[in-house]
Image (cartoon, helix red, strand yellow):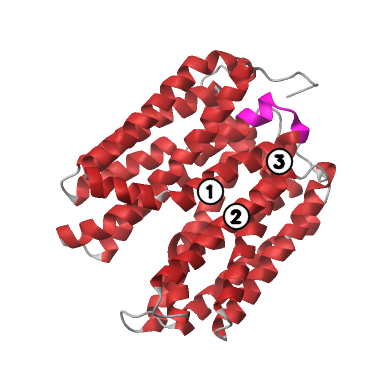
Amino acid sequence: MQGSRKPSIGEYLIFACLVLAYFVTFFFRVSASVVLPALSVEWGMDAALAGFISSLYFYTYGLMQPISGALSDRFGPSTVVAAGLVLGSLGSVIFGLAKGPALLALGRLVIGLGLSPMLTGVLVFQGTHFDKSKYALYSGITFFVGNVGAVVAVTPLGMALDTWGRGASFIAMAVVSSALALVLVFLRRHDTLSSERAGASEGKGMLTKKMAGAFRAIKESRQLAAACVMWGAILGPLLALQGLWAVSWCDAVYPGDLAAARLWATMIGIGIMVGNILTAASKSIGTKKRKAVSYGVVVYAVSWALLCVLMQIKAPYVITMALASLVGASAGVSHTLLTAVVDELSPKGEGGSVFGLVNMIGFALTILSQSLTGFVINAMSGGSVYAPKAFTAAFAIIALIAAVPVLCIKALAGRSMSGK
């Protein structure tokens, strides 16, 4: 947003709806971890098949990022997110009513396709409608609300499944998503800046041109490329820990108390939320965003290294839990600031396309990190019980990936060639 024009109430309402849409993605994201274990027993599915069904969300979500970002640039975030919510609702109904693994997989795939525009949509909207100097504030709010979903979604979803069953629960989620889509359609007239920009982008093959332009912008700007690598090298290790192995790692090191292991894992998400909100509330960062990012990624790398060492020597539970929280907090700070940096460096009118590519790389590294840790842990455990040494080896490798952003600090501070 240029100048000092005050956003309208309608624009704030659209932003709130887009943030809620991002919140909804976390309910769907964690749904597999709540539903699939029980269904695996009931239907006799093996762990490999259940894992494949769960991963379809991440594969389609990640691969669609460049396209969803370009669509937001082309048609405007409110329109694209509304359409995505409807498609995600269809996937939810398919998943909820599935009577076998094939339809479960199809539902999970459609959900990932539908929800792919949620993050890029809200980031594009805040970049075009709100004061650029407050970009980190709005990003912090977005990520905070999203991560609230990650922390609180499991319990209410589990209660809904116990009370209403899978079919009714996922139909209810579809109704909520569709209702939110209708509100966005009603409010889309307030999405003026994105609509004007979309209207100026008419032409056959425009999506391809936008994605090519985003790729070229990253290739030609050392700063943007550095921000892209930083984003992925933070997200991959974080989701390998938070989204897959945190409970198992803690339970292997401190056996016998599963509730404590779940609390240990939950504190990572709480740490992320703290990092988000602290960054959003800070008024002193301003033009020092890139310098603040450099501090954030150094703390992230150091906290990962210390966590691996202290888990190996079985340091007191409280200390390693605090370090796990610090991993989350430093990731929350860094990611929030990086959204502002990427928006600042992206060519005008291509922010969504650039964010899409950046986020796709992040999910690619997430898949790599999760696959790598799974391979190492299984190979070194030699049985059904995971050995602490297996986690040490796996996360020592992940800690090296987490240190990569430190190598990009100098490039991030250089002069941009993106033309913005």
Question: Could you tell which of marks 3 and 2 lies nearer the N-terminus?
Answer: 3
The vertical placement of 317 against 28, above or below, is below
User: Which residue is farthest bottom?
Assistant: 313
Residue assigned mark 3 = 136
Give, as a three-letter code, the residue at label 1: Asn
Dominant secondary structure (helix, strand or loop) of the stretch shown in magenta: helix
- The image quadrant that residue 135 belongs to is top right
* In this picture, residue 302 sits left or right of residue 45: right
Please indicate, yes or no, whether residue 47 appears anywhere in the rendered image. Answer: yes
Nearest to the observer: residue 351 or residue 241:
241
Question: Could you tell which of marks 1 and 2 lies nearer the N-terminus?
Answer: 1
Residue assigned mark 1 = 147
- The image quadrant that residue 92 belongs to is top left
Residue assigned mark 2 = 272
The vertical placement of 238 against 91, above or below, is below
The vertical placement of 208 against 302, above or below, is above
The magenta region covers 125-133
Assess disc 2: are there few (<14), some (14-19) or many (≥20) residues with their C-alpha within 10 Å of its C-alpha: many
Disc 1 to disc 2: CB gap under 8 Å: yes
Assess disc 3: are there few (<14), some (14-19) or many (≥20) residues with their C-alpha within 10 Å of its C-alpha: many
* In this picture, residue 360 sits left or right of residue 408: left
Whole-number angstrom distance, CA of label 3 to CA of label 2 = 15 Å
The vertical placement of 180 against 340, above or below, is above
